[in-house]
Amino acid sequence: MSEEILYEVKDYIATITINRPKVLNACTLDNFKEIEDLIEQSAIDPKVGVIVLTGAGDRAFCVGGDINWEKGSDGKSGLEDAALEFHLNRKIAQCLKPVIARVSGYAIGGGHHIAYFCDITIAAEHSIFGQNGPRVGSPAGGYLVAHAANVIGHKRARELWMLCRKYTAQQALEWGLVNAVVPKEKLDEEVKKWANEMLALSPTCLKIVKRSLYDQMAPIMDRSMADLIAEVAPNYFKTGEQQEGASAFLEKRPPNFALYR
């Protein structure tokens, strides 16, 4: 366990905390892999009944991949590896124990789709939600995108992913992206309340329920980000389009994607 990903088990609740508040809890691939390992560990630990995934501080839950890591060096993007090796959302969906996203602040990009893959999402009222991939040249695809339609319907999912707008916690609640919105100071209390309600139920029945819901997702789960990149744009990371998106973000300017249409 690293200092960047924290893990605690108390009262049958395992809490996984992304501890990178200086970069709004943005993650590298190593961070995501560590969270995957902890979810697998929690899934087989008899002292864990519910898993809570959160970010350190009140500025952000997670804003996805660390853009400096995504930009990469020597012409190689960290996203190339992520396309093949990012499995966190799948791990959340396949885990037979309930996973709660505790959101305080920004849940953007990868952080946002992680939140909507969790079984329950509880947000502080100052939180902001949204996708960022097409805005910064990050080619999310496959089941990461498709599951949004299961959660909020196709029209909302297309708006979410194709416009990259930002939404308040209250809007996210109205859309069905989150289950509850509470004042920041009440967030931990609310998360514990939901966790304790599930801990009072039959753990085996909860496993059966969660596996049943996963089976409903199964038709989309075989379509990974790497599959979609290979099908639609196999040379994507060689064209400069992804690098333009990342550079524009770091330089705080609008990206110029006109050359890549």
Image: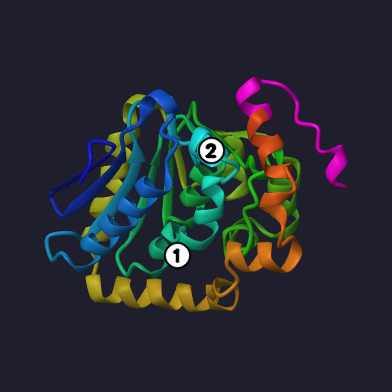
Q: Residue at x 75, y 26 (%)?
A: 254
Q: Amino acid at mark 1?
A: Arg
Q: Position of residue 15 (x, y in %)?
A: 24, 46
Residue 63 versus residue 248: which sits nearer the camera? 248
Under circle 2, the secondary element is: loop
Task: Please give the range of residues in magenta.
Answer: 248-261
Residue 11 versus residue 194: which sits nearer the camera? 11
Q: Is residue 253 magenta?
A: yes
Q: Give the answer, above or below, for where 205 lies relative to 169.
A: below
Report the residue marked by disc 1.
Answer: 90
Dot 1, how many residues are within 10 Å of its Cα: few (below 14), some (14-19), or many (20+)? some
Numbered tag placed on residue 73 in the rendering? 2
Q: Residue at x 31, y 43 (%)?
A: 191
**Between tags 1 and 2, which lies in front?**
2
Say which quarter of the image contains residue 144. Answer: bottom right
Q: Position of residue 161 (x, y in %)?
A: 69, 48
Q: Is residue 47 left or right of residue 1?
A: left
Numbered tag placed on residue 142 in the rendering? none
Under circle 1, the secondary element is: helix
Q: Earlier in the sequence, mark 1 or mark 2?
A: 2
